[in-house]
Amino acid sequence: MTDERPPETPEHPEEKEKKAADAESGKEKDAPADENKDGTAAAEKQPAAKPAAEKPAAAAKPAGPKPVEPSGEVVETDVTRALGEKFGGAVKGVANPCGEATVSVEKARLIDTLTWLHDDPAARMDYLSDLTAVHYPNNEKKIEVVYHLYSIEKNHSLRVRVPLDEGESCPTATGIWRTADWHEREVHDLMGVVFDGHPNLVTILLPEGWEDHPLRKEYPLGGAQEEEIRANAFGRPGTMSDDLDEVRKIIKEYRYEP
Amino acid sequence: MSRESTPANPESPLRDVMETRELELNLGPQHPATHGVYRAILKLDGEKIRQVDSVIGYLHRGIEKWCEYRTYPKCTPIFDRLDYLSAVINCHGYVGAVEKLLGVEVPKKAQYIRVVMDELQRIASHLIWLGTHALDLGAMTMLFYPMRERETIMNLMEAMLGQRLLPNAYPIGGVRFEFPNGWVQACRNFLADFPGRVADYEGLLSENRIWRQRTVGVGPISGEDAVNIGLSGPTLRGSGVYFDVRKAMPYSSYEDFDFEVPLGANGDVYDRYMCRIREMRQSARIIQQALDGMPEGDLKGKVSRIIRPPAGEVYYTVEGSKGQLGYYIVSDGTDKPWRLHVRGPSFVNLQGVDPMSRGELVADVVAIIGSIDIVLGEVDR
């Protein structure tokens, strides 16, 4: 079991702290400069928190978490060139290792861009194949909503990404494609992104009244309840160690008796 | 939930004593016609349907989260559990996505074997659909004949892949096994019988007066609406929209085979039924061509033992038995996916229940849900 745990697990307490710090910044939310400060603050906290975790193995890890950046080259198609001419700096090409056309659009021009892509006779993206979101806690922009567009008539596709800050809302695409309805409800459920103007943004996959958003990176795999049970069983928060001998020792010393 | 009164018929002598209002009726979650734990809240005006609210999520298992904690090869078996009636095709979608991200070339022979297994699975899935859909509409006899043919396919699956239902069919980079001895002949025997069997099903249903009364003109949807709602697969093609991933974005050598994409005209339950029936015949044709033209070569491409794709994202779609099945993988350059998202065709197609059902009768909802062909494992993921 232990070998299946991710290497990040020893850092779990810090991640929780970071989450708390993020939540505080969300409450205050004075200026975007605050968030930068928060990022550095979280990075500073990490070395301080590591001795508390009492893990010599954790000290070997690099100090800052690495942001996720795509490799490969920016793919240019007729549609991306037309987008660049029409919307200028609001649309930027994104690198992709598999040759898929990808653009990143500013939130303010998102609906204009998507409407143009849907209506323009040269683009004609009439089919919204997929809509989802990705959480990048280590990047500058924490959440990206991703649209996969396809044109049945022209047989070409395009990926549109919208970078968002933590807690920032996203305009809804339901006015353009009705299929976005359930996709956006799913993203709201699992990622916590609010879609402005959505007609019925209620829970879809999770049970009613579920508070957290499971697909965010700080959410534990087994769910909050499992973490609680583990904490009670083994007298330590969060996760088990990667070191098998240590696990055996913990089980021996803190044998859980219901 | 709105319960506002509707104005009574002013001509009616009972207008002052009778109150008419919207009625709410629950279909499911434990209803045989919903094919799983799916609940539809029907809002009725008499027996006419005004609105259908779908309640899903009873089977939500969070497999997208689960995959973020597994290496790429270890993720493979879980996708069989999405749409458990076409496990092989789900597996193909996932390994195809990882292969595209890695830039792995799959040998031609492996591609052909995949086509054979995929199309057998598509037939098996359509057979289950045919039996249960007909059963929903009261044609009890129809359940048993497709099951007989499906059993043959399941036996072929077991002989080839070692498992009947959830075989974990393909490794990343190719296929595991050569066809076992005698398998190709058994498959050919099945293909020789199969068109006659489909003719039998059609003889029982297609011109049957009761069947036509229950399906023709029921739950129509226009092609434009169907595209806007994001329907795919036979549910979209029933409305006359030519979109099949195997033709539009050919993968796994589908461009080598000669087959037609059946289209409907009116987008009603009957057209969707006809599309699937004709699709089964086309699948049999594809298998025949793949067996005849089976190339020689390796079974597996060059894949390193530890799979670490380059950082970046990929979206790979295949034509599942229910529609366009898409896998979106974000890699951060490590051996585990940073994020994995599945575009389940059943999930998107289920949105069509509401626009299709408006104005129809209560009994027709069963026909409409059946004609969309949902599998709740894929809806909730």
Image: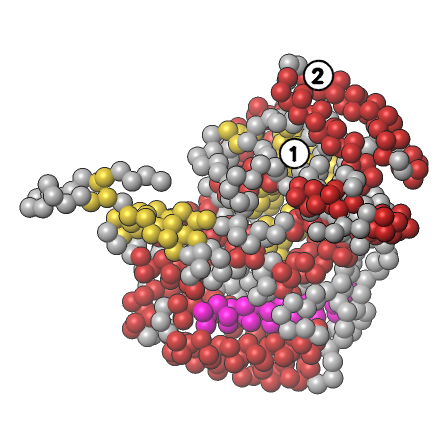
The boundaries of the magenta stretch are B107-132
Name the one closer to the observer, B147 or B266.
B147
Q: CA distance from mark 1 to mark 2?
A: 20 Å
For the residue labelled by badge 2, is the local secondary structure a helix, a strand or a loop? helix
Which x, y percent locates residue B14?
Answer: 9, 46
Eye-nearest disc, 1 or 2: 2
Which comes sooner in the sequence, label 1 or label 2? 2
Instruction: Kindly indicate the quadrant of the structure image that contains residue B28.
Output: bottom left
Q: Horizontally, is B262 left or right of B136 in the view?
A: right
Q: Horizontally, is A159 left or right of A203 in the view?
A: right
The question of residue B48 being in magenta is answered with: no
The residue at 71%/74% (across/down) is B162
Circle 1 residue: A144
Circle 2 residue: A34
Which amino acid, mark 2?
A: Asp
Q: Is residue B217 visible?
A: yes
Which x, y percent locates residue B339?
Answer: 70, 44
Which x, y percent locates residue B196?
Answer: 48, 82
The residue at 6%/46% (across/down) is B13
Marks 1 & 2 on one chain:
yes
Label disc, if present, on residue A230 of the rendered structure: none
Chain under numbered label 1: A
Main SS of the magenta part reads: helix
Quadrant containing the N terminus of chain A in the rendered view: bottom right
Which amino acid, mark 1?
A: Glu
Name the one closer to the observer, A81 or B182.
B182
The residue at 53%/29% (across/down) is A171
Contact, mark 1 vs mark 2 (Cβ under 8 Å) = no
Chain under numbered label 2: A
